[in-house]
Image (cartoon, helix red, strand yellow):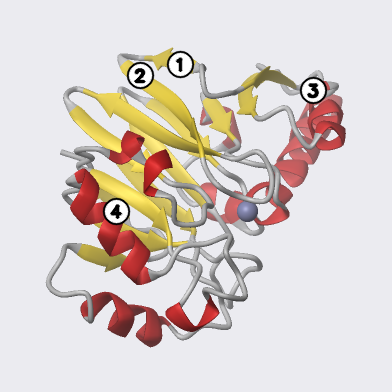
Amino acid sequence: MNIRILGYSGGYPGAGVPTSGYLISFERKNILVDCGSGVLAELQKTTPIECLDAIILSHMHQDHISDFSVLRYALDMKSKRGDPINPIPIFAPQSPRGIFDEIAGDTNISVSVIDSSSCLHIAGATITFHPTSHSVECYGIRVEHSGSVFSYSSDSSYDPSLFGFLSDSNLSILDCGGLSADVEKDKKHMTPADCFSLHNEFGIKRVVLSHLIPYHSVSETISEAEACGPWPFEIAEMGKVYIVL
Ligand SMILES: [Zn+2]
């Protein structure tokens, strides 16, 4: 199982850095997780839209879905010029209802609701969904394939009681949109110290800190992470492919 970073900015894109998007690939299947601003351009460097086997939207904030509207527009354009369109399966939370209803009416895609009981089986992988603590309905994702585990926190404040799904992950991509100085102002995202605690508590083997807000300096994120002690964290990098073993 490979994970490619297509975007890791939180809130809004940084220079050359799209907002959230991750491509999971295994057994010749490609699953796009989140589709933020700039992700479509980054995706197509390696993977045509037609080669997507599913899209998972963790939640309906614009920094996770804004290019999903652009992707739908691309499918509409291709359909109107007569290109064959196989509706891409989309998995998304049902709220906010207005956004869900709008995408559910698109005939170029096939939309299914996700909730905490959802479980997908795709080409030998099992994908489960876990509610996080965020300002809208939001799900973290756990993917198990060939004995390896990839997990993605999506957006969340720090609440270890919600994060059992990270247990024994070979690789976790965690929301690290906060710095310690922000904690009182923004309780919707985690800090490097929060991510370190999750790593310790749930035995995560390798952690990628992502959803980095462009107005924060990456060096501050790194120094707060390093201050926690030695642990296997990395800062997300554009285009980097992580092999999950
Ligand atoms: Zn969010």
SS at mark 4? helix
Distance Cα–Cα, label 2 vs label 1: 6 Å
Asked if disc 3 and disc 1 are in contact, CB closer than 8 Å, the reply is no
Residue for badge 2:
126
Q: Amino acid at mark 3?
A: Ala
Check disc 4: other Cα within 10 Å, few if <14, some if 14-19, many if 20+. Answer: many
Distance Cα–Cα, label 4 vs label 2: 22 Å
Q: Residue 124's image quarter? A: top left
Q: Is residue 39 above or below residue 142?
A: below
How many circles with numbers are drawn on the protein?
A: 4
- Which badge, 2 or 3, is on the more N-terminal residue? 3
Q: Is mark 2 within 8 Å of ligand 1?
A: no
Q: Is residue 104 above or below residue 8?
A: above
Q: Is mark 1 within 8 Å of ligand 1?
A: no
- Which badge, 2 or 1, is on the more N-terminal residue? 1
SS at mark 3? helix
Asked if disc 4 and disc 2 are in contact, CB closer than 8 Å, the reply is no
Is 66 placed left or right of 121 in the picture?
Answer: right
Q: Residue 146's image quarter? A: top left
Residue for badge 3:
104
Residue 206 visible in the current orientation: no
Residue for badge 1:
120
Q: Amino acid at mark 4?
A: Leu
SS at mark 1? strand
Asked if disc 2 and disc 1 are in contact, CB closer than 8 Å, the reply is yes
Distance Cα–Cα, label 4 vs label 3: 35 Å
Check disc 1: other Cα within 10 Å, few if <14, some if 14-19, many if 20+. Answer: some
| Image location (x, y in percent) of residue 214 | 56, 77
Determine the residue positioned at 40% across, 16% down: 122
